Amino acid sequence: MLGLPMDLLGAATLRLPHGAPDWVARDMAGLPALLMLDAANNRGWFDGAVFASESATLAAVNGVASGITRTIGDYVAADAPELLANGDLSAGLGDWTAVNGATATVNAGALEMSGSGLTNPSIRSGAIPTVQGKAYRMKATYRRGTSSSSPLVVSSRATSLSPVGNSLPANATTANITQQRIFAAEATASYIALRTASGPNGTVIGDDFSVKEAAAFRGFSAPEFTALLRFRTPASLPAAPRVLFSFDDGGARNRYRIGLNTDGTLSILLDSNGVNRITLTIPAALVTLNGEHRLHLSSNGATRFLAALDGTNLFGSQVGSMVPAGAAWLRLGTSPAGGEDWTGQILDAAFFNREVVPGWFVWAVGDSYVASIGGASVEQGVEASSSRQVLATGISGSAIAAQLAAMQPNPGLAGCPLVHWDGDANGVSVEEDKAIFEAMATFCPRHVFVGATRRANNAALAGAVDQRNGWLASRFGARYLDPHPALAALSDGSSGDLAALAANRVPPSCLQGDGVHLTPAAMAVIGGAIAAKLTALGF
């Protein structure tokens, strides 16, 4: 109960301008999900409003329920701009181009294609500006003229119209039909074309072509999104895969999908442009039959695709450049293919129109000590010492101003504990750096700052490094980690090491041949110290 008058609870919606009720999922900053369907308690939340039933919530996002399955999509805003130039042929043929031997004309304000004995004759539009990872709704009116072959309309990322993506159905009649469907952008330019299923041997006619951006529902769009799912698995292993979640373009070409396999594993995959890009596999040992689980799935649509099962079981892919899937259909407990419906329960689902990374991941930021040089990085060290997974955004040779600038476009990571290590202290400036550290601490409330190393070959910076490390220790207390005690303990006892330790420097045996970067063994020791620090702080 929300502690509200009963007459208000009976209304379809109740807007709470100052925040969501406590049952609505929130990110680490306390901001609520855009949409939440709470089937277990028959209620919902969308766009700042409480709905008195799940069915009312679904109606608000044009969703359909069938048993435990839910299907939402596709949505095009009333004011969505038209992206296809000259789709109504008002400028004549314009940049429409006949390909594969076809002939193109404009007759009575409509596009007319003709030809004889051709393979895939088509008239292609000009380039349509699109974004990889977004979905678009194409629409057209078309019919046969004198042709014996049925016209259809196709989408493609190439001027050659190969490969062909989704298509509107063929029209075998001489009466106009108007059809629409979703296609996913597979490049920065897309094309649609009027074509025939075989050689036309006559004319086919099309008009009122349109392409507009589409989403699953108002306010929610790929490629950046987060889904939180609470569910029960079936009581026994399925004889065929069962789909818990699908975010797709209406087919299997572009999709995010979570499915329970016949061996008890959960597969989380990203397919785009008809190619599987990422598959995360959750072992059967973590999936309890007839058990309740929580799954957190997030993507920034550019470099990260992450999942967490029950909070602490982490799975993820972090790449330099991800190829996201354009999608405009959200499906719970079902897929476009049919026959894959979930046989357990879906208790609730929440969706954010932004990346919200599970807070058990660790975010490492810094210079080459984080970016990895010579096979050694803080990421490897922490992961080897804990069950945590590290997302590393190190920039070799950078100063901390650049490191902060790289953090700021990633608000979805702000809920993770931050480990910052500017190990080489490039361009250290104690007074200027203080403000940057304060900004990092504000950006990520849970943070650990690791001190820069004192080495023989950065003696010129030794004074500034010592001052900055001293300030970090006094300002952040337990949230500061001095790496030198752990490195001193790793000394091999050689004369060179002893001399360095006497001078308050890093033992040479802990450094790679460049005299700058830590060896894998030294980094592993620091990684273990960082992991222990995170645990001690409750991060």
Image (tube, grey):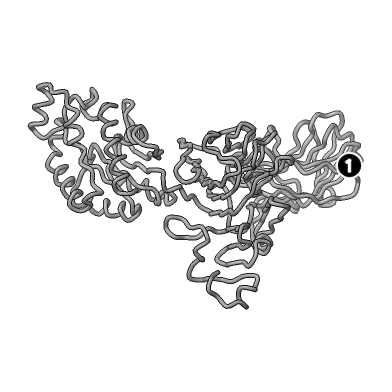
Going by the image, does 358 lie left or right of 186? left
Q: 132 or 1, which is in the foreground?
A: 1
Q: Is residue 330 left or right of residue 32?
A: right
Determine which quarter of the picture holds residue 99: top right
Amino acid on which the number 1 mark rests in the picture: Ala
- Residue sitting nearer the eye, 152 or 29: 29
Q: How many numbered marks appear? A: 1
Q: Residue at x 63, y 34 (%)?
A: 261
- Residue nearest the viewer, comparing 442 with 205: 442
Q: On the image, numbered disc 1 is attached to which residue?
A: 172
Q: Determine which quarter of the picture holds residue 45.
A: bottom right
Q: Secondary structure at mark 1?
A: loop
Q: Residue at x 30, y 38 (%)?
A: 367
Q: Is residue 278 visible to the viewer in this orientation of the structure?
A: no
- Residue 303 seen in the current view: yes
Q: Residues within 10 Å of mark 1 (few under 14, many from 20)?
A: some
Looking at the image, residue 513 sits to the left or right of residue 126; the answer is left
Residue 183 spot, x, y in % from top left:
68, 44
Q: Position of residue 445 (x, y in %)?
A: 33, 54
Quadrant containing the N terminus in the rendered view: bottom right
- Please name whichever residue, 21 or 496, is drawn nearer the observer in this view of the structure: 21
Q: Position of residue 143 (x, y in %)?
A: 86, 46
The part of the image, by quadrant, that contains residue 372 is top left
Q: Which percent across, then down, holds residue 394?
A: 34, 38
What's the residue at 31%, 39% (across, down)? Answer: 531
Up-down relation of residue 385 to residue 439 (above or below): above
As drawn, 502 above or below 3: above
